[in-house]
């Protein structure tokens, strides 16, 4: 019943976790069906499928908009434009991005979609009840889908990914960084290692080569796993050289080592994708 409510109802509120779970399910199902449609060469079928997914996507977005106490017309405008674009494609063929007029339409639409994703996916709903219903969070935990063990596990994992300290530590004169591996860095190491593995498996399948697998081993050795193994030694060296950071100004010594490590980890899958694309282009 929860799943039916999640993808069909326009009333009530949902928090960020159910939104992302529903969003991931819809993206996975739609991507798979679109790929199957492309294998049959049916561009019209792909457009019809996109129209079919509009209803559950809209229902999901509206409940998150309610949680943010925004007007449903905000997402209604977005989905109305998307439906109009699909109908245009059905009647006139593919949307030609080489046309300057189409570019002038597509880029603002893409920016609007990004803003909506940030607003609905990353910002907390209003505290307490609002005009759309009671607060979607109960003691900090989502009430919808929380009876499923996998959802509770995912919630705990997402909480573990949040750093315990701000990007800028505030008191830049503090001489030492903690040598113990932060919980968030450890969980990001495991997460990014899994992402890198998926990237390499997909690349190996598409390129029909074991080269990406070797890249994965190399990057993993230098990246996430290497960071976990060398964290304490690296922090000790950093603490010994903290005077050098101070000499460069408060900004350098004020940066959080935890956040810097996370940003470095996030860069490894992008580096792998660029490297694999460059190799395959040759």
Image (tube, helix red, strand yellow):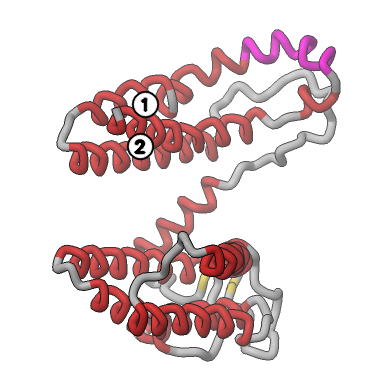
Q: Could you tell me which residue is drawn at 61 percent across and 42 percent down?
A: 163
Quarter of the N terminus within the rendering: bottom left
Report the residue marked by disc 1: 220
Q: Is residue 171 left or right of residue 134?
A: right
Q: Could you tell me which residue is drawn at 43 percent across and 70 percent down?
A: 146
| Residue 141 in sight from this viewpoint | no
3D distance between C-alphas at marks 1 and 2: 8 Å
> Residue 261, how many percent across, how many down?
57, 30
**Is residue 245 part of the magenta span, yes or no?**
yes
- Compared with 192, 218 (above or below) is above
Neighbour tally class for label 1: few under 14, some 14-19, many 20 plus, Cα within 10 Å: many
Report the residue marked by disc 2: 196
Secondary structure under badge 1?
helix
- Compared with 220, 16 (above or below) is below
Q: Quadrant of residue 262?
A: top right
Disc on res. 168: none
Q: Main secondary structure of the magenta part?
A: helix
The answer to whether the residues at label 1 and label 2 have Cβ atoms under 8 Å apart is yes
> Residue 271, how many percent across, how many down?
44, 31
Q: Nearer the viewer, residue 96 or 85?
A: 96
Q: Quadrant of residue 169?
A: top right
Q: Is residue 203 left or right of residue 75?
A: left
Q: Quadrant of residue 239?
A: top right
**Is residue 193 part of the magenta span, yes or no?**
no
Q: Which residues are magenta?
A: 236-248
Q: Could you tell me which residue is drawn at 35 percent across and 84 percent down?
A: 91
Secondary structure under badge 2?
helix
């Amino acid at each position: 019943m929860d799943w039916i409510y999640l993808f069909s109802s326009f009333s009530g509120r949902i928090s960020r976790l159910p939104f992302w779970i529903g969003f991931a399910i819809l993206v996975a199902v739609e991507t798979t069906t679109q790929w199957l449609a492309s294998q049959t060469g049916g561009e019209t079928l792909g457009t019809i499928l996109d129209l079919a997914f509009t209803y559950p996507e809209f229902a999901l977005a509206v409940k998150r908009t309610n949680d943010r106490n925004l007007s449903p017309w905000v997402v209604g405008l977005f989905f109305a434009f998307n439906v109009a674009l699909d109908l245009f494609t059905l009647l006139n063929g593919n949307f030609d991005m080489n046309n300057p007029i189409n570019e002038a339409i597509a880029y603002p639409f893409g920016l609007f979609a990004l803003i909506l994703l940030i607003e609905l996916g990353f910002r907390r709903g209003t505290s307490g009840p609002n005009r759309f219903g009671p607060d979607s969070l109960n003691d900090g935990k989502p009430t919808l889908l929380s009876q499923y063990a996998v959802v509770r596990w995912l919630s705990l994992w997402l909480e573990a990914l949040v750093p315990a300290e701000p990007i800028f530590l505030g008191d830049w004169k503090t001489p030492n960084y903690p040598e113990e591996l932060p919980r968030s860095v450890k969980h990001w190491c495991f997460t990014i290692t899994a992402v890198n593995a998926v990237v390499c498996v997909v690349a190996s399948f598409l390129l029909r080569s074991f080269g990406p697998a070797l890249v994965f081993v190399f990057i993993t050795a230098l990246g996430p796993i290497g960071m976990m193994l060398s964290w304490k030694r690296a922090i000790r060296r950093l603490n010994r050289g903290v005077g050098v950071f101070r000499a460069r100004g408060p900004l350098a010594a004020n940066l959080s080592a935890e956040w810097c490590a996370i940003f470095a980890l996030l860069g490894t899958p992008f580096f792998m994708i660029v490297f694999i694309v460059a190799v395959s282009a040759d």
